[in-house]
Amino acid sequence: MARTVRDAQLGSRTARAALPARKKPYYRLILQGLHLGYYRGSRTGSWSARRFLGAGRYEESRLGTADDIADADGVTILSFAQAQERARDWFLARSKADAGDEAPVETYTVSDALDDYEQDYVRRGGKAHDRLRNAINAHIRPPLGKIELGKLSRRKLEGWLETLVNTPPRLRSTKGQAPRHRERDASPEGRRRRRETANRILTVVKAALNLAYQHRKVGSKDGWEAVKPYREVASAKIRYLTDAESKRLIEACKSPFRELVTGALLTGARYGELAAMTVGDFDYANRTIHIPRSKSGKARHVYLTDEGRDFFATVLTEKAASDRLFGRDSGEAWGHSHQFRYMRVACDAAAIEPAISFHVLRHTYASRLAMRGVPLNVIAAQLGHSDIRMTEKHYAHLAPSYIGETIRAAFGTLDIAAASLA
């Protein structure tokens, strides 16, 4: 390992804190022609490296955030010694490229980062691949894809985010057609919804850029780390059907979509989980449906009522164990978007306004349990949530005794009421 260079100005947090903030970095010679730079901002600093190319020209690369406030982790936050090591690695890579030992480092853009993130998402078993790709191709790649990661700035990202908020929601269109948009909703609720959507898309962008940083495709996260999502835009208000609406919807559906909707109302399972269910997943004796893989990646058992058990027993009649429980008229499986048109038609026939999405059936199942006093951790287990936070966010307000019981159990007794009245 190369010897760490010492520097009285840059070597410690205390020494760097005494340096005045300025636009030009403070440089320290590390190797012949290679300097480590420290940029001192108003609150914290960052590391960079530069190498001399001749004729007064330098090539520069950002390395990471300095450990001025937070402790160094060797990945995103670097100490003086770690910054030197990363600078040497970069310098060696560039020297090899100059000598022809390695191919020159190609320009790495936001589009490249999105491609790598999508591949990593699939490798890790992500289940919403189509949704991820649609979000990338519709909202991220067109405006940001050609920008080099090293040139991506906070101002560019915040401008893109605000443009996203001011663009009306897209409408579904036939593949190959130009995008269509709804009329812009300028109400406070309409803006809240657009900001909530923008926050979700920003999460994808940051995940892709952070992965690129972990793979050392860029030397610093400064271009996006300071970009914050909109605050107080997440809404816990959910739509669910009353019992009367649920019955009207079932009566309005035609078979085999009716069976699919009934299965959702009796299990709270997601559309994709229902579409993938096989006869072998149903256990009549234990009154359960096994879901091999939830959205969280974990398997779970959904416990059925007697009504649910009898319904599934009827659905699987004359089917083999490997057959799907729910299928279309053609015998094919329910696909990614097949439910939209059927649900819209059924809502019109059942006079359910506004029309609901299939996912509302899952909310209906969970809301019914919450309003009947089922503990939220039990509801979370039935729904396949990885923890109780999402369940609390959506359904706690429907449980009349949940907040009161939680406060009474946690607060205890002070034994002061009687004494104060004496």
Image: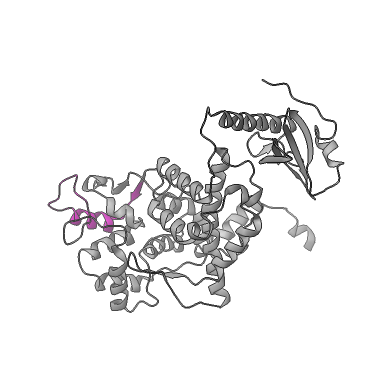
- The residue positioned 60% from the left and 58% from the top of the image is 157
Q: Is residue 71 left or right of residue 100?
A: right
* In front of the other: 3 or 187: 3
> Can residue 91 be seen in this snapshot?
yes
Q: Residue furthest left?
A: 318
- The residue positioned 62% from the left and 61% from the top of the image is 158
Looking at the rendered image, the quarter that the C terminus falls into is bottom right
Q: How many marks?
A: 0
* In front of the other: 135 or 101: 101
Check the image and report above or below for 14 versus 24: above
User: What segment carries the magenta color?
Assistant: 301-326
Q: Is residue 191 left or right of residue 1?
A: left
Q: Is residue 414 left or right of residue 410?
A: right
- The residue positioned 74% from the left and 29% from the top of the image is 30
In terms of image quadrants, where is residue 210?
top right
Check the image and report above or below for 249 versus 395: below
Check the image and report above or below for 391 versus 246: above
- The residue positioned 36% from the left and 56% from the top of the image is 270
Q: Is residue 75 left or right of residue 168?
A: right
* In front of the other: 403 or 29: 29
In terms of image quadrants, where is residue 329?
bottom left
> Tell me, what colour scheme is on the image?
one colour
* In front of the other: 359 or 60: 60
Looking at the rendered image, the quarter that the N terminus falls into is top right
Position of residue 239 measured from the top left corner of the image (x, y, whole percent): 44, 69
Q: Residue 300: say if magenta.
A: no
> Can residue 248 be seen in this snapshot?
no
Q: Residue 318: say if magenta.
A: yes
Position of residue 55 measured from the top left corner of the image (x, y, whole percent): 72, 39
